[in-house]
Amino acid sequence: MKFRSIKGTKDILPGESEKWQFVEALIREVMHEANYREIRTPVFEETALFQRSIGELTDIVSKEMYTFRDRSDESVTLKPEGTASVLRAYIQYNLGEQSPLTKLYYIGPMFRQERPQAGRLRQFHQFGAEALGSSSPQLDVEMMLIPLEVCRRLGIGSVTLKVNSVGCEKCRPAYRKRLVQELMAVYDQLSEESKTRVKQNPLRVLDSKDERDRAATRTAPLMKDFLCDECRMHFAEVERLLKETKTPYEIDGRLVRGLDYYTKTAFEITSAALGSQDALAGGGRYDLLVHELGGKPTAGVGFAAGMERLMIILEKLGQSPDPHIRPDLYIAAADNAARRWAFRFAHQLRQKGVAADLDYLGRSLKAQMREANRQNARYVIVIGDKELATGKAKLKKMESGQEEEVLLTDLASKLA
Ligand code: AMP
């Protein structure tokens, strides 16, 4: 019997994992510069948390969550996104009382039972941020600037920022009513999926990719033309800030995103390098959500971006980071006495922060040299009777082939 990883999951193997570490470090740097602090929430939560926040009628909750009953018959769910857990923790630990504005970020795995394809996995990773406690449009724009800055530092220039306003509880109901009327007039022309959405989630019909829906809704009214004064001013300020920061953007009146909780600003960052699954990041404002989840009314805004998709773009652009992971020193040993010495010496070197490796397979000196080459070691020393007796050895720099005689007692400090 051979075990394989589960469909839609991926192992991040050596060679890849170093690239992930590099990108993660860069993300942490960008988050730190904007004063976001890391939060790590559990991988699973009470199912009701996601039903309540993401919304029962969304694709995520209605068909994608990994939900199961544990051995105490509690319904738990592997988190499909980060915001709900972060807000749960924010409320649970009264973080709002410690400071009127809380800026948090996360990097971690998420789970959705979607049909796997290029760029779409069942376990994937997101990095994201949430700012809780302010309704300032500056934070809406900060949420767009953070993932864009991550892209910029990674040399990804080919991204598009799309923004929209989905209104609020004051202006959306009237628009929604109007939209449903219009959609009912073209009901027969809609795709089956959109037909079921007309009553439940009519705004989603507008961002359907199906050609029939596109054609039928070409002249449908858009939320951005129905905004109340407050939402309109908020959106105008978002646009002004984008211009002020010289951030290219497009207004996409059909952008609603697949989660129910957004109010006012919604945005998405896409990349042509991704193909059909072209969304790299998405986010928006959710001023009602903290209250909805049992906290005090608190304005909030956030984003989430897909790590795998970021890695795909880097690969496509030939800009994958190339972190040099290699030993500083490979110790080749000629006989058993030298092997014993090599193990002890490697231990001492490692304690001083020098990356040292040796042969554990009893291979010939020639094979050990080949291994040192394969590992791309910076230096090699060969240890045998003579070296142990004199306390001196030849240190070979692999790049140039140059050899230098060194005292073994000096080697650690020399390499450190
Ligand atoms: P969402 O939470 O759906 O707004 O997703 C935010 C970002 O996470 C997307 O723009 C993608 O980059 C990424 N993402 C979402 N779902 C998946 C998935 N199934 N596989 C890989 N990445 C995903």
Image: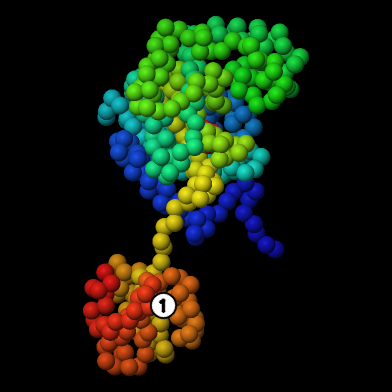
Q: Is residue 233 above or below residue 366?
A: above
Q: Would residue 152 appear left or right of 116 to someone viewing this image?
A: left
Is 352 left or right of 190, judged from the image as shown? left
**On the rendering, which quadrant does ligand 1 occupy?**
top right
Color encoding of the figure: rainbow
Percent position of residue 147, x then y: 42, 36
Residue 202 shows in this picture: yes
Q: Quadrant of residue 100?
A: top left
Residue shown at 42% from the left, 7% from the top = 229
x, y percentage for residue 153?
39, 43
User: Visible in this render: residue 69?
Assistant: no
Report the quarter where the C terminus lies.
Answer: bottom left
Element type where label 1 sits in the image: strand
Question: Image quadrant for the N terminus?
Answer: bottom right
Residue 359 left/right relative to 405: right
Which residue position is annotated with label 1? 358
- Quadrant hosting residue 232: top left
Please, what is the three-letter code of the amino acid marked with disc 1? Leu
The part of the image, by quadrant, that contains residue 195 is top right
Residue at 48 percent across and 29 percent down: it is 161
Q: Residues within 10 Å of mark 1 (few under 14, many from 20)?
A: many
Q: Residue at x 66, y 15 (%)?
A: 217
Query: Is 230 or 196 nearer to us in this picture?
Result: 230
* Residue drawn at (53%, 36%) of the image: 271
**Residue 43 vs residue 19, the one in the foreground:** 19
